[in-house]
Image (tube, helix red, strand yellow):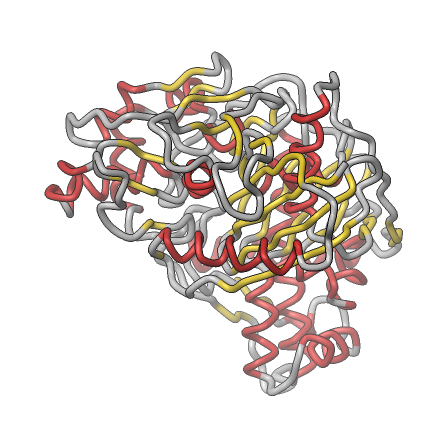
Amino acid sequence: MVVVGIDSSTQSTKALVVDAEDGRVLGEGRAAHPEGTEVAPEAWWAACEQAVHHALAGVSAPVEAVAVAGQQHGMVALDPSGKPVRDALLWNDTRSAPQARALVARHGAADLARRTGLVPVASFTIAKLAWLAEHEPGNADAVDRVLLPHDWLTWRLAGSPERACTDRGDASGTGYYSPGTGRWLPDLLTEAMGGRSPRLPDVLGPTESPGAVAAGPLGGALLAAGTGDNMAGALGLGIGSGDVVVSVGTSGTTFSVRDEPCADETGTVAGFCDATGRFLPLVCTLNAARVLTSTARLLGTDLDGLSELALSANPGADGLTLLPYFEGERTPDLPDAAGTLTGMRGTNMTPQNLARAAVEGMLCGLADGIDALRQVGAGVRRVLLIGGGSASRAVRALAPSLFGVGVEVPEPAEYVALGAARQAAWAVSGAASPPRWGLRTTAYEATDVDSGAEVRHAYRAARRSVHGI
């Protein structure tokens, strides 16, 4: 049996054709998305069609099911005809930070965390809708329904029916859904929208389907519920108790699975749902792999060259510390911040030390995420390191000492798209649990935790000095 998994991420769409029995990839395709923090949803549709076309080339077996995983939080606001009232605001658009702060001031962080699992920041959909109501009231008046990127693509695959659907994983990242009860919180949405009450999609369970693909090369295939990208990544890896995933992509994410919902009133840990009926506590940073590419560009090299430079420097970069908040930051909540390099002296301003400080600074932010998961009860038996940044030799070498635990790097794969494919296979099988697909990893031991602790101490000291937190 053949299934298709689609990953509509910030930068591109990836589509995989997968053997549902063992997870073997039979075909794959990719298409880029426009850059920026607001994008016309039609660009995602065009990329989806292109990626699926390339993935299916040379695959003769019929596709039985398909699922879409998408970047979380993006605001897709549609008018009554189904047309977007404006370009979608993506998760990494920080203009709604004042609206997020206002929501917290009105309700209190503890109450919002208890009700929604989240303390709003600019990334979340509820803050973006509040921004829309305040700054573009005409567009807000025209909104008939609100979807997320994966919801919208699933809706389009189904042929734009009257019914739109989401899943509990992606819904849990909006700020107006209760992970504990599994229900929307329309009062919070209406308040954020200035009294307006747009329609919301139906929330499907892990194996439920909104129907079949209406047309095109996937026509007739069963549509699975789909989910958010982090939830699909967890499903693609098949993580269990004691596993913590650190993903070094456009954003950096650190997450685990648990059986009970999480409510962290500090806002550090987002209490999401996963794609299997469990919960997915998650910490997200805005700055991850781009810290590496930006620093490499500054130093006139590529990622391999950056690794070579970083690994030739001493731990702690001879006193250089980088707070890599190049795009503002979500964790900690510093949407207007910029990157800061501290500890500069004439003797340590070398390309090697700057490269080392970039890798260490990025990893320190992710290590803080692991600590935050521990504080809400997550066990940390091993860390699975994924995402484009995990290919860096320096990241692989330095992560264990900074994380304080052994790291395993799975073989390179599109784990979000694989997770979507696994959901599709699960939905069409009718089984009680997802299919069991193998995972091969390479292990890296934590051998120098003392120097890692010293680097993290310097990072925290620099953050307190610059930002007071």
Residue at the outermost left position: 138
Q: Is residue 157 left or right of residue 300?
A: left
Residue drawn at 83 percent across, 49 percent down: 408
Residue drawn at 49 percent across, 55 percent down: 10
Residue drawn at 70 percent across, 67 percent down: 316
Q: Is residue 58 left or right of residue 181?
A: right
Give the vertical position of 159 relative to 271 (above or below): below
Give the vertical position of 31 relative to 374 (above or below): below
Q: Is residue 281 left or right of residue 137?
A: right
Residue at the outermost top position: 181
Indicate the quadrant where residue 31 lies: bottom right
Q: How far from the left and from the top, in percent, is residue 166?
A: 46, 29
Residue 463 makes an appearance in the image = no
Q: How far from the left and from the top, in percent, is residue 272?
A: 53, 29
The N terminus is located in which quarter?
top right
Q: How far from the left and from the top, in percent, is residue 242?
A: 78, 31
Camera-nearest residue between 4 and 269? 4
Give the vertical position of 187 relative to 219 (above or below): above
Residue drawn at 66 percent across, 18 percent down: 259
Q: How far from the left and from the top, in percent, is residue 83?
A: 26, 44
Task: Give the total number of marks visible in the rendering.
Answer: 0
Camera-nearest residue between 405 and 278? 278
Camera-nearest residue between 161 and 118? 161
